[in-house]
Image: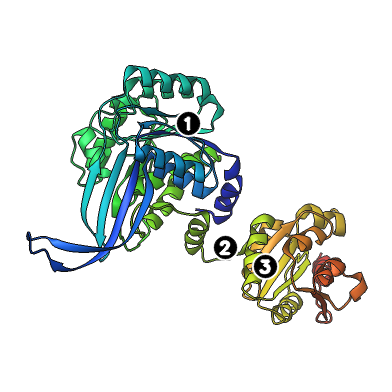
Amino acid sequence: MDRKTVESLFQRASNLKCLVVGDLMLDEYLWGKTERISPEAPVQVVDVLREDLRLGGAGNVANNLLALGCQVTVASVIGEDENGWALLKSFSRQGIDTTPIFQEAGRRTGRKTRVIASNQQIVRIDRESREPLSEQIEQRLVGWLQEHITGFDVVLVSDYLKGVLTPAVLASITATATERKIPVLVDPKGTDYRKYRGATCLTPNRKEAEAASGIPIRDQESLHRAAETLMSQVELDNLLITRSEEGMSLFCGTGETVHIPTVAREVFDVTGAGDTVLALLACGLAGGLPLAEAARLANVAAGIAVAKLGTSTVTPTEIIAAVSLEHRDSDSKIKNREVLAEIIAGERAKGKRVVFTNGCFDLLHAGHVKYLQAARRLGDLLILGLNSDASVRRLKGPKRPLIDEEERAHLMAALDCIDYVCLFEEDTPLELITALQPQILVKGGDYTPEGVVGKEVVESYGGRVELIPFVDGKSTTNIIEKVLERYTDEQ
């Protein structure tokens, strides 16, 4: 995964409108310790220390999307009971649109209670309804979907076989969305996937894929046979099979297969990992990523999710950090302005001194390196504002730069003395300085303090300007002139 792509995706996430349709439930956790056996029966006695109530099922999918910054609406049916009202209250508190969550008298809102001691689940207690929706409530849900589904960028179907996703509900989703070219992603359940016909992609885990295809998955050959069987049965264009410690495999109707290895992590709890995969796949696809890249992103997020105990979400910060670990090179230092501003604000809050300098840095030479090393010694972080190609041309003429902006950015980011590089399009770095608010602004010794762009901005909040002399005789112009002189003489 490319870290800059991931950062840009999460910046766009607030504009993504996601519809989650599926079975809602509450996940209750009773956390405690066990130190004795009951005198009444040969069972452990758990002393409950704390209780935790979370959104489960399709609610956890919604929570994951919300954690990514997306706009979320949830469509479902719950009961007119205490658990149902608790669900609605929790959604509303988080800003999730619950308009299409209908309540049905006599229906039991699902609640799963997990008792956990010493980080181990002791027992789970389920209280729920599993019967299909009544015809009346089904028509209300179908009617809403047909009328409103076109207002979303992606539809996520979270099926837990609790009766909400009837054949009529599923058909209304796929028919309406397909007509408007809205992707429909399904986390399936059961053994008959034909009910999901028309979906963009299904995301079963290995056990689910085995049950639905009737083929035990033991190796690559059986994995491919199971995938081919499911894709043929459901007339699928795409199938993503999650395979626990073996990662994920994406099968496309074009014949392409992408195997994505897992990232080694300690697994504490796989509860809700499928919800995380579905949410990240949807966010990536709706945000413009190719399906294979969205799947890779989902794989990274799933690795983070299983390292947590209980139903949980994964944040953009955690995902970006994980992606950055895969790229311990210059790429991890190159940031866009908005992302870098957030990073720098956090570093300043920790008491770190941020140093800023800027330039074209076309043909890197020893004078540049010594200047930058001296600048880095003035603080805790050195930020380099790098003129874009268009900016360099306006400043240096139509024949410059000799090295394009992407290469220059990577060359500068490869230096240990530079912490972050940020390209800017303007002729001066004034807007970038204003956004980043460094405490120390550095320029070369050929400037006067009064001539340094951004001086007033930095000094307005207590910062200062520092001038560092360049090494005599070291400049890009001198290098160009020397090259021209030597090669002209040879001719």
Query: Are there few (<14), some (14-19), or many (20+) residues within 10 Å of tag 1?
Result: many
The residue closer to the viewer here, 240 or 461, is: 461
Residue 93, x across and y down, in percent? 50, 45
| Image depth: mark 1 or mark 2 in front | 1
- Disc on res. 183: 1
Query: In which image quadrant can residue 486 be found?
Result: bottom right
Report helix, strand or loop for mark 2.
Answer: helix
Residue 399 visible to an observer of this rendering = no
Query: Are there few (<14), some (14-19), or many (20+) residues within 10 Å of tag 3?
Result: many
The residue closer to the viewer here, 25 or 179, is: 25
- Disc on res. 412: 3
Residue 124, x across and y down, in percent? 22, 50
| Image depth: mark 2 or mark 3 in front | 2
Vertical placement of residue 409 versus 196, above or below:
below
Q: Amino acid at mark 3?
A: Met
- Disc on res. 147: none
Q: Amino acid at mark 1?
A: Pro
Distance from disc 1 to disc 3, alpha carbons, whole Å, reads 40 Å
The residue closer to the viewer here, 77 or 234, is: 77
Residue 416, x across and y down, in percent? 61, 75
Label 2 sits on residue? 332
